Image (cartoon, rainbow, N blue to C red):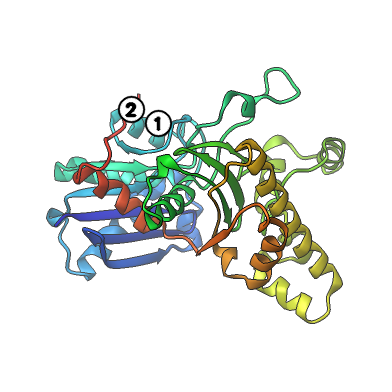
Amino acid sequence: MKKILVLNLGSTSSKVAVFSDYDMLFEDVIRHNVDQTNLPLIDQVPFRLESIKKSLEQHQITLQAIDAIACRGGVLKPIEGGTYLINNIMYHDLKSFKYGFHASNLSGVIGYELSQELNIDSYIVDPVVVDELIPEARITGIKGIERRSIFHALNQKSVAKQYADGIGKNYEDINVIVAHLGGGISIGAHRKGRVIEVNDGLLGEGPLSPERAGSIPNDALLKWAIDHDYNSIEANNELSKNSGLLSYFGTNDCLKVEQLMENGDKAAKLVLDAMCYQISKSIGSCAVVLEGQVDQIIITGGLSYSKYIINKVKQYVSWLQNVTIYEGEKEMHALNVGVLDLFYGKISTKSYE
């Protein structure tokens, strides 16, 4: 039996879990106060590390009992999907925030430092920068600007593999469309184990979401940025954190917007329906990329709990293929499985160079 410590650090919290093989022994969500999370990211390492150690102590698990550490992948250079050993190169890329600033980088930084202390290995699994796009998917209408792959890779690949297992096949043998519906939305075309097309789930492609703007007409977007005198960082922050449902209704809580709709708010219904419409269009475009060879459409993420959204999307896309729902997301389990599969010889470790 292998004990795996799983670390999934976000902007305001640190999620910690320990698994014994595939069984979760515990999971803690440690909320940090604003004074702590307002510190520069690298300065947050000491208090987050201490909170992780306290969590283990409270559950009477010693660090020496841990066989390996699974970490949420941070912002790195584009890499293909898989489980990667955190080596010195990756550690320095995460710690220096070479490719972008995000709290998820701290998962790998702390995981690596703990693993060095304990003389064990630490890993990341399917980080947000997984890039398996086909060449045609990268091209835009401006030379020198290419589309990039940033999406909910961990959850998308996890549910696709779960579906494949359920029908007695390998992930590498199926074609599926996966729609991760959360605060951000990403919809990917998975062909034989690779995500060959997916919208940028962070900064403005695809459907509007609870927090993100989605695709905006170029002229209107440029005028909006100029009128508000935004620089690129300010504009990106608005597009990725303060747009979507939040822009229309002052909340990113989809349930509250549904309640507005149920109370007769016509604008709430229109915007929700537009979000479902845009989600469905993206699913349809992925079906085209897969040339109609689609084994299943899979919907996951927090919004998949909404019967209204699911029924509305199904109304548009069920003619393409059957729809399977995996409610919510199980990132901690997916991280654990990504490392256990190494221990049991199901996959091979990938190298970050």
The structure residue drawn at horizontal position 34% and vertical position 28%, both measured from the top left corner, is: 352
Residues packed near mark 1 inside 10 Å, few (<14), some (14 to 19) or many (20 plus) = some
Please state which of residues 250 and 327 is positioned toward the viewer in this rendering: 327
Q: Quadrant of residue 89?
A: top left
Q: Are marks 1 and 2 in contact (CB under 8 Å)?
A: yes
Q: Is residue 223 left or right of residue 161?
A: right
- Residue type beneath disc 2: Ile
Q: Is residue 198 left or right of residue 43?
A: right
Residue 277 rendering spot, x and y as whole percentages: 75, 56
Residue 339 rendering spot, x and y as whole percentages: 27, 47
- Residue type beneath disc 1: Asp
Q: Is residue 64 left or right of residue 162?
A: left
The structure residue drawn at horizontal position 70% and vertical position 35%, both measured from the top left corner, is: 232
Residue 55, numbered label: none
Q: Element under label 1?
A: helix
Disc 2 designates what residue? Answer: 89
Please state which of residues 297 and 29 is positioned toward the viewer in this rendering: 297
Where does the N terminus fall, quadrant-wise? bottom left
Q: Is residue 42 visible?
A: no
Disc 1 designates what residue? Answer: 93
Residues packed near mark 2 inside 10 Å, few (<14), some (14 to 19) or many (20 plus) = few
In space, the residues marked 1 and 2 are separated at their CA atoms by 6 Å
Q: Element under label 2?
A: helix
Residue 256 rendering spot, x and y as whole percentages: 69, 74
Q: Is residue 273 left or right of residue 11?
A: right
Q: Residue lying at the far top in this picture: please name it.
A: 143
Q: Is residue 317 visible?
A: yes
The relative height of residue 220 versus residue 136 in the rendered view (above or below) is below
